[in-house]
Image (cartoon, helix red, strand yellow):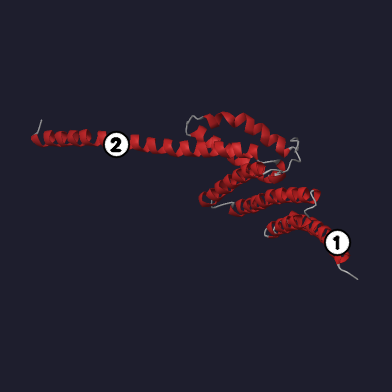
Amino acid sequence: MKPSILIFVAVTLLVVCFSVPSYLRWRRQQKELRDKLFSRLSKRSNRLFSSLGIIPDRYLPRDTKVFLVEYLLSVIEQLMGANYQSNFVSNKDQLTRLLTDLKQGRVVTSKDRVTTQEQLEQTHDAILYLLKEMRNMLDRHGAGRSIIKHHIVLMRYSHALAYRDLLVRQARDDLDNDKKNRALEKYRAALSVIEKNSSVNSSKREVARLQNMIQDVENILFARKDKQVPN
């Protein structure tokens, strides 16, 4: 064998010997990075799914719930396509049934409202997590940004609506205890919260209701003051 060929073979073997470990190390690093990304995605999606179960139906529009369930199913398909196993993937059948029931109108909605500070905090925390994830979707998805923004607006309103419900409940308790001035303050605070979300159509109905509540209390207070004024 010619010396030149021997040199070429030797150089080739050296290159291979040095390249293979580097390539294997790069592959291992890429797998570790991929697993970390999928692990975070899986954990975030699992928390998002849990948040859907915390928020009362009044504060979670059906279309938004459909949108989020479809998103969660797309995440599961992504994880399965990458052959990544996690506890979240096991929710596929449950989410599929939920999506079918939502689209066919078979889900019975409750009329529960926030009535305590603890319920408000739980509901607000869950809504804020949904908002955080939807904002992350805006960064990752070029298409469909207008749809995501629409659902963000709806959930911001839901955040305000939950606070409105607690304020109204507290105001009614104040009325029962003959604390009409305090009740009036809370009704006005509730009105202010809802008016900040006037871009949502259903807010107009809530504004009208709150204005009527405020008017009723003001009429009582003004009537009482008139009686107190000497002739």
Going 59% across and 47% down the picture, which residue do you hit? 128
Q: Position of residue 208 (x, y in %)?
A: 79, 58
Considering the image in quadrants, where does the N terminus appear?
top left
Q: What residue did someone put label 1 on?
A: 224
| Mark 2 closeness class: few <14, some 14–19, many ≥20 residues within 10 Å | few
Q: Position of residue 183 (x, y in %)?
A: 76, 54
Q: Does 120 appear above or below 226?
A: above
Q: Tell me the quarter of the picture where residue 35 sits.
A: top left
Give the numbered dot on residue 159: none
Q: Does 38 appear above or below 180?
A: above
Q: Three-letter amino acid code at disc 2?
A: Tyr
The label nearer to you, 2 versus 1, is 1
- Name the one closer to the observer, 84 or 81: 84
Q: Three-letter amino acid code at disc 1?
A: Arg
Q: Is residue 89 left or right of residue 182?
A: left
In the image as oriented, which residue stretches furthest toward the left? Answer: 3
Whether tag 2 and tag 1 are in contact, CB under 8 A, the answer is no
Q: Is residue 125 left or right of residue 171?
A: left
Q: What residue did someone put label 2 on?
A: 23
Mark 2 or mark 1: whose residue is earlier in sequence? 2
Q: Secondary structure at mark 2?
A: helix
